[in-house]
């Protein structure tokens, strides 16, 4: 895992699932169970978001989730191999890659506008670790497109969202289209997206959609398959 991939391909299913401890809890069994279900449903990009979880507990969660990824059966398509995205923490992403078996775990790092700058994070993680960047409008999307440290960008919130305490202003489908105009990198729509809205976000120009609250912890497989059918 020494070489940096020249091109990061978006997931073929167009679904980017975010396992948020605010929804699923921070107990390792609950989190790993959710990740295993998502992988079994065919989701290939999964982000672990552990906002407010102490560093040690967040590391233990990431380590446990990494083992689930390593155990997941592959379908032989390297370009659509599962990627575990770590939210915010370059240290955890780097440690996972350092501890994992050679080539056995693909880890990405997702950064918000208030997190470590991508260029600084790039120095902290191995070259093969892709970096995603949150953007909230055309100007930030242009910056992410021109930043060689950024491999993918998220644009949002597309619709109103309740998963963040202080969400940025809604960009709408117009914001997705504007971001598509300025970037050739994988573009992920995020924010208030459900099965009904997901196809509209893709039609506006997103390569995939990231979902949080559309994943029902009480009926995870069913809600995941509903989203996958909507995006098929």
Image (cartoon, rainbow, N blue to C red):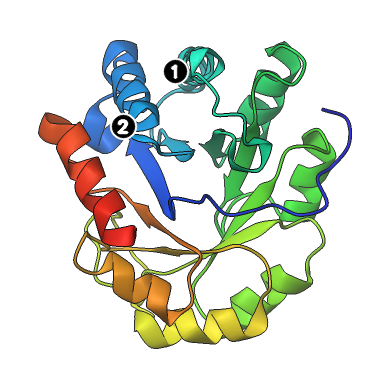
Residue 158 visible here: no
Q: Is 183 situated left or right of 113 in this image?
A: right
Dot 2 falls on a residue whose secondary structure is helix
Residue linked to disc 2: 21
Q: Which mark is residue 61?
A: 1
Q: Is 106 situated left or right of 17 in this image?
A: right
- Give coordinates of residue 125: x percent, y percent: 77, 34
- Give coordinates of residue 229: x percent, y percent: 26, 53
Residue, x 36% and y 21% (percent of image)? 36
Dot 1 falls on a residue whose secondary structure is helix
User: Looking at this view, is 56 or 156 the one in front?
Assistant: 156
* Residue 17, quarter of the rendered image: top left
Disc 2 to disc 1: CB gap under 8 Å: yes
Q: Which mark is residue 11?
A: none
Residue, x 50% and y 19% (percent of image)? 73
* Residue 78, quarter of the rendered image: top right
- Give coordinates of residue 211: x percent, y percent: 32, 52
Tell me if mark 1 has few (under 14), some (14-19) or many (20+) residues whose alpha carbon lies within 10 angstroms of its own.
many
């Amino acid at each position: 895992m020494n070489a940096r991939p020249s091109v990061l391909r978006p997931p073929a299913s167009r679904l980017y699932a975010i396992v948020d401890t605010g929804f699923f809890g921070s107990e390792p069994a609950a989190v790993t169970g959710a990740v295993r279900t998502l992988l079994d449903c065919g989701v290939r990009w999964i982000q672990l978001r552990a906002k407010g979880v102490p560093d040690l507990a967040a590391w233990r969660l990431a380590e446990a989730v990494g083992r689930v990824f390593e155990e997941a059966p592959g379908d032989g398509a390297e370009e659509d191999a599962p990627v575990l995205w770590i939210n915010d923490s370059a240290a955890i992403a780097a440690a996972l890659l350092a501890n994992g078996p050679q080539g056995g775990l693909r880890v990405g790092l997702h950064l918000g506008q208030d997190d470590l700058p991508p260029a600084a994070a790039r120095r902290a993680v191995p070259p093969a670790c892709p970096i995603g960047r949150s953007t909230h409008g055309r100007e930030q999307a242009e910056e992410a497109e021109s930043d060689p440290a950024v491999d993918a960008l998220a644009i949002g919130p597309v619709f109103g969202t309740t998963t963040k305490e202080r969400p940025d202003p809604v960009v709408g489908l117009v914001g997705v289209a504007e971001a598509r105009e300025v970037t050739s990198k994988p573009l992920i729509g995020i924010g208030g997206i459900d099965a009904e809205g997901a196809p509209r976000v893709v039609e506006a120009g997103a390569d995939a959609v990231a979902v949080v609250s559309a994943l029902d912890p009480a009926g995870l497989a069913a809600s995941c398959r509903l989203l996958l059918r909507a995006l098929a």
